[in-house]
Amino acid sequence: MAEHGIAARVGIVCGSRSDFPVMEKAVELLGKLEIPCELHAISAHRAPDLLFRFVGGAEARGIRVFIAAAGGAAHLPGVVAAKTILPVIGVPIQTQVAGGLDSLLSIVQMPKGIPVATVAVGGAENAALLAAEILALSDPELRGRLQAYRDAQTRSIEDDETNADLRGER
């Protein structure tokens, strides 16, 4: 979460607090990459005016990318996208009805002209990485941190004991 005096660059919004366990993974990864963010629970259906205020004031608060998570009808990412020209990344949340397929299809099927980039069901970490990649386009220091993260990921696979016989083939 953004520290006092440091503007959040990623605005994360969930349809309800029940989505927080999934989206806290995005918050954690953004923290590792030193990207300040904010996390809110705002229903597009039950509190649309609050959502509009959140989105409408985001750019002035320093937000440059949104991550919006929702399950079921999953209108939240689309409503956020309809109210801003900032990039919006949708995270479908798993449901009991269709295992998250309903959420995925609701977010992916946006009408022409209102794009929402969409990650896998429960894909909070990939949403955070995509937000970081977008921000890194204009932030060389973040680009370096993101590259270091990716390099560490690669090393962890290469260093796995099951790959010992392949290490000399780099």
Image: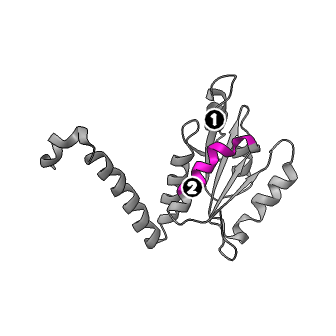
Q: In which quadrant will I find the N terminus?
A: bottom right
Residue 153 appears at what percent x and percent y?
Answer: 36, 51
Relative placement, left or right, of 159 versus 71 is left
Residue 51 appears at what percent x and percent y?
Answer: 80, 53
Q: Find the magenta span and give its range.
A: 18-29
Front residue of 80/95: it is 95
**Residue with the most extreme top position:** 97
Task: List the residue tagged with mark 2.
Answer: 28
> In the displayed structure, would residue 22 be above or below residue 97?
below
Can you tell which mark lies on residue 51? Answer: none
Residue 135 appears at what percent x and percent y?
Answer: 52, 64
Relative placement, left or right, of 15 versus 157 is right
Dot 1: element:
loop
Counting residues from the N terminus, which is met first, the one under dot 2 or under dot 1? 2
Q: Residues within 10 Å of mark 1 (few under 14, many from 20)?
A: few
Going by the numbered disc 2, the residue's amino acid type is Glu
Q: Is residue 115 visible?
A: no
Front residue of 142/115: it is 142
Task: Identify which residue is drawn at 79% across, 49% down.
Answer: 42
Relative placement, left or right, of 136 versus 66 is left
Looking at the image, is mark 2 or mark 1 nearer the viewer?
2
Front residue of 146/22: it is 22
Going by the numbered disc 1, the residue's amino acid type is Gln
Task: List the residue tagged with mark 1.
Answer: 109
**Residue with the most extreme front position:** 161
Q: Is residue 141 visible?
A: yes
Dot 2: element:
helix
**3D distance between C-alphas at marks 2 and 1:** 29 Å
